[in-house]
């Protein structure tokens, strides 16, 4: 990575990050857009979870991550505290990797 | 003058602390990887400070390490960050203050700060603006301290993946997602988002699947609202 490349990535990233807070600001959205925007976090977070759980380089990979996130899902369902969910997910995946199941 | 801020609830602070640990360790591994890929420690630190988007930094350095051009590195990194547009749009109404404050807030907009602010704000347990700032600043500090330790001190710790820490993020996001799924439309939005992302992962460049998943929110409008519900 050269300095110009880092500056370019930083500038592009900032533009993408600032589009919402600076571009849309606190303006009232038209009702339909407001409803979509209300539903956005569910779609985004769910997609992020999916990609981080089974996404690999240009492929779907079912590995120790899926077991860990599965265990975390059970913990969420049982209303475990946030930190416990993270620890259960990470520990499950770590344990499977430790015994070579990945 | 704004009134003196109330401390955030313990539950919120412990969520931030949990994410901070994972981010710090990943910052460390980014520092190590960046130096291994030929960046000077100073350049690695500048990157974490100026870009502040972990996934895109790993991607960009990975492209360079694999012999790719700086342009390819920038493009793949920026593509991963396109999700900050929809995240920022959902977050915008929850932020307070004028242009300057929002301009600074934009820099510390990361998955963790946006997701926690939206999740906590939805149920009115804490001011989403304050959750956003505390999470964003915590991420800024831990990610950069981690990067510096990794870049200058090198392989002090083992592989974060051996500790399962890569799963800390989807596990945490799942916990933040669950309470958002309180309406039929929200559940359709999430399911459609997952379906779109999974279908695109094998073929689309990294970053596109999550960006395209925003269409799930639009698709959810096709199902009727819950009876008596307002969303």
Image (cartoon, rainbow, N blue to C red):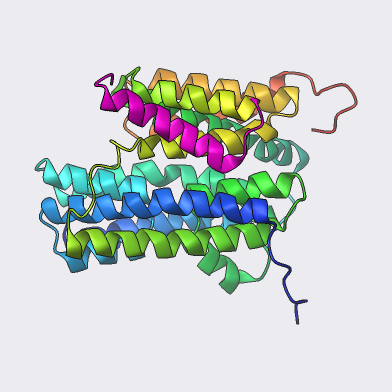
Residue A85 magenta? yes
Q: Would residue A27 appear left or right of B78 to someone viewing this image?
A: right
Judge by depth and name the residue closer to the eye, A79 or A45. Answer: A79
Magenta stretch, residue numbers = A78-102
Camera-nearest residue between B58 and B212: B58
Q: Is residue A48 visible?
A: no
- The secondary structure making up most of the magenta span is helix
Query: Horizontal placement of B55 versus A89: left or right?
Result: left
Q: Position of residue B192 (x, y in %)?
A: 57, 21
Query: Is A63 situated above or below A52?
Result: above
On screen, residue B203 above or below B124: above
Q: Which residue is at 56% across, 28% downward? A: B215
Find residue A79 and report its horizontal and vertical position in percent.
66, 31
Residue B67 in the image: state x and y as whole percent: 9, 43
Q: Is residue A58 left or right of residue A67?
A: left
Q: Tell me: residue A62, above or below residue B172.
A: above
Vertical side of B121 occupied by B8: above or below: below
């Amino acid at each position: 990575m050269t300095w110009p490349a880092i500056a370019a990535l930083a500038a592009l990233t900032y533009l993408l990050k600032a589009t919402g807070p600076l571009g849309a600001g606190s303006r009232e959205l038209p009702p339909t857009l407001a409803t979509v925007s209300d539903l956005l976090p569910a779609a985004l977070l769910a997609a992020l979870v999916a990609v981080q759980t089974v996404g690999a380089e240009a492929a779907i990979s079912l590995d120790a991550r899926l077991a860990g996130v599965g265990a975390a899902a059970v913990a969420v369902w049982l209303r475990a505290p946030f930190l416990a969910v993270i620890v259960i997910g990470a520990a499950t995946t770590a344990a499977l990797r430790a015994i070579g199941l990945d | 003058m704004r009134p003196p801020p109330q401390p955030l609830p313990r539950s919120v602070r412990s969520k931030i602390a949990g994410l901070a640990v994972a981010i710090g360790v990943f910052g460390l591994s980014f520092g190590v990887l960046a130096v291994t890929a030929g960046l000077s420690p100073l350049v690695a630190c500048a990157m974490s400070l100026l870009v502040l988007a972990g996934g895109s930094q790993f991607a960009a350095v990975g492209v360079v390490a694999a012999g790719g051009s700086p342009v390819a590195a920038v493009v793949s990194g920026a593509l991963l960050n396109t999700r900050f547009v929809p995240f920022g749009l959902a977050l915008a109404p929850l932020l307070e203050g004028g242009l300057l404050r929002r301009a600074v807030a934009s820099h510390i907009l990361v998955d963790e700060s946006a997701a926690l602010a939206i999740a906590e704000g939805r149920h009115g347990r804490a001011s989403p603006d304050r959750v956003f700032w505390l999470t964003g600043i915590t991420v800024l500090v831990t990610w950069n301290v981690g990067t510096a330790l990794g870049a200058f001190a090198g392989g002090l710790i083992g592989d974060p993946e051996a500790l399962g820490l890569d799963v800390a993020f989807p596990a945490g996001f799942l916990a933040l997602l669950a309470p958002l799924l309180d309406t039929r439309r929200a559940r359709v939005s999430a399911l459609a988002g997952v379906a779109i992302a999974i279908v695109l992962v094998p073929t689309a460049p990294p970053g596109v699947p999550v960006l395209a998943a925003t269409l799930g929110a639009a698709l959810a409008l096709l199902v009727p609202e819950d009876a008596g519900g307002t969303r």
